[in-house]
Image: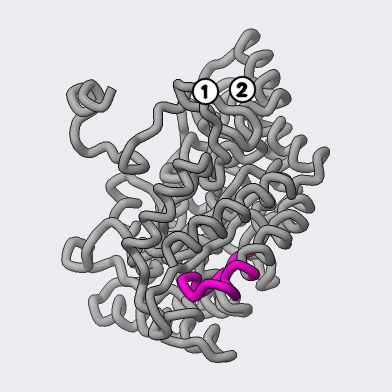
């Protein structure tokens, strides 16, 4: 299979693990390979409410047997879902525009921001990931070097309070000040700022989590400069952090634009750009918007089913309760083994940072070995962060305390082995 993959798909595709898996089936929190070995999925936030959730499967099956077409016809599904989604937002965020991927959602957000502000400059955190189109890959700074970026892209440090520039109580103010500097950098280049975009869990930088007040202060600074604040909720959204439905909510402010994707349809391709109406009105005066498959009847049926499952099965509350149990269990292991330098995150979005010594030097090689060993023991996760020394945990929202206990037992055995 590896040889055929290289021949038919080319060399650019990437696979997980030294010995890649051939996954053939999924159910709840479990994935099964071609030998019917099951693996606890601790990484895949796409299957938000669990792999092959029966209610989502049935919603897709039912609608695809009736109609699936493009979005230039009227259809109840897209309207019902848009209303349901907007009810989860502050009143000011009152327009939903649908696409198929988070990349498309972010690209539309940039188009709207640039049209409204008449600027082109984009401010983004270092080591960020926002998608893979040409425009969005350019602001996905984990995948490109500074010399490869256009003049209108300026980065700011990710607000890492564990090993970053600032770890004090006023870290939010100090990190936010870098956004002011970024605005000034753009001005020196005769470029007007259009937007600051941030993944509100700051995942690719190591799930660092913004210090309280940082997002709100960032919004104030970029708005004062004439730009818009874009909250990328593709990863933290839909209740994953447990404490709130969206990652931006704890800072008690309203973004100008919110984007979301993968978890919306439990793997069925649907994404959204939610905007305050004045911004999209100016955009609509200059151009229309059309996405052939974005918001089609089947995708919206899947997304509606996901929303219903989240609410009916109290999955946000489950993320908070079980996620707290999981995090406390990891902290207990960390107290015994200095290999674990930090445990952070909330709900079902947790990071375990591996370090070599008291100077916090990243234990990159050991983290990779831990990922491989956990796989052999039937647990799937992977590394994240600039040094790839951080285990990122994002189990499906139906993850249970029993699942967490199994993970904790295996994690302790593996950490002990490599300490």
Q: Position of residue 300 (x, y in %)?
A: 63, 29
- Comparing 133 with 336, the one in front is 336
| Secondary structure found at label 1 | loop
Which of 123 and 283 lies nearest the eye of the viewer?
123
- Contact? badges 2 and 1 (CB < 8 Å): no
Q: Position of residue 248 (x, y in %)?
A: 62, 64
Rendered location of residue 95, percent (x, y) = 63, 47
Q: Residue at x 58, y 53 (%)?
A: 275
Q: Relative to residue 145, is residue 245 depicted above or below?
A: above
* Nearer the camera: disc 2 or disc 1: 1
Question: In 3D space, how far apart are the residues under numbered discs 2 and 1 (Cα atoms)?
Answer: 34 Å
Q: Which mark is residue 36?
A: 1
In magenta stretch: residue 175: no
Magenta-tinted stretch? 332-346
| Residue at mark 2 | 297
Residue at 42% across / 62% down in the picture? 418
């Amino acid at each position: 299979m590896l040889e055929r993959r290289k021949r038919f798909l080319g060399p650019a595709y990437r696979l997980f693990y030294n010995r890649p898996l051939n996954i053939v089936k999924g159910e709840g929190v479990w994935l099964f390979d071609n030998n019917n070995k099951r693996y606890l999925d601790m990484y895949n936030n796409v299957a938000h409410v669990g792999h092959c959730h029966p209610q989502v499967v049935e919603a897709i099956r039912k609608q695809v047997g009736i109609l699936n077409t493009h979005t230039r016809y009227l259809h109840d599904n897209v309207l019902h879902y848009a209303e349901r989604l907007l009810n989860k937002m502050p009143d000011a965020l009152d327009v939903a525009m649908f696409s198929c991927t988070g990349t498309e959602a972010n690209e539309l957000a940039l188009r709207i921001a640039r049209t409204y502000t008449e600027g082109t400059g984009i401010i983004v955190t270092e080591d960020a990931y926002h998608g893979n189109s040409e425009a969005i890959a350019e602001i996905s700074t984990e995948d490109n070097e500074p010399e490869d970026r256009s003049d209108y892209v300026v980065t700011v440090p990710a607000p890492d309070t564990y090993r970053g520039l600032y770890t004090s109580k006023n870290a939010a103010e100090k990190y936010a000040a870098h956004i002011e500097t970024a605005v000034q950098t753009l001005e020196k280049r005769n470029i007007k700022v259009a937007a600051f975009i941030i993944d509100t869990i700051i995942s690719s930088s190591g799930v660092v989590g913004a210090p309280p007040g940082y997002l709100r202060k960032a919004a104030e600074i970029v708005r004062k400069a004439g730009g818009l604040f874009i909250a990328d909720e593709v990863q933290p959204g839909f209740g994953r952090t447990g404490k709130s439905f969206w990652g931006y909510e704890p800072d008690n402010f309203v973004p100008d634009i919110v984007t979301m994707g993968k978890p919306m349809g439990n793997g069925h391709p649907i994404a959204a750009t939610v905007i305050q109406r004045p911004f999209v009105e100016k955009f609509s005066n200059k151009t229309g918007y059309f996405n052939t498959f974005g918001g089609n009847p089947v995708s919206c049926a899947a997304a509606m089913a996901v929303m219903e499952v989240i609410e009916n099965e109290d999955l946000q509350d489950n993320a908070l309760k079980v996620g707290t149990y999981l995090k406390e269990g990891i902290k207990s292991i960390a107290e015994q083994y200095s290999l674990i330098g930090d445990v952070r995150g909330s709900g079902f979005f947790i990071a375990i940072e591996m370090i070599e010594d008291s100077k916090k030097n990243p234990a990159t090689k050991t983290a990779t070995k831990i990922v491989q060993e956990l796989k052999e023991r039937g647990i799937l996760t992977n590394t994240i962060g600039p040094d790839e020394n951080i285990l990122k945990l994002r189990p499906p929202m139906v993850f249970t305390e029993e699942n967490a206990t199994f993970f904790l037992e295996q994690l302790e055995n593996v950490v002990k082995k490599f300490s």
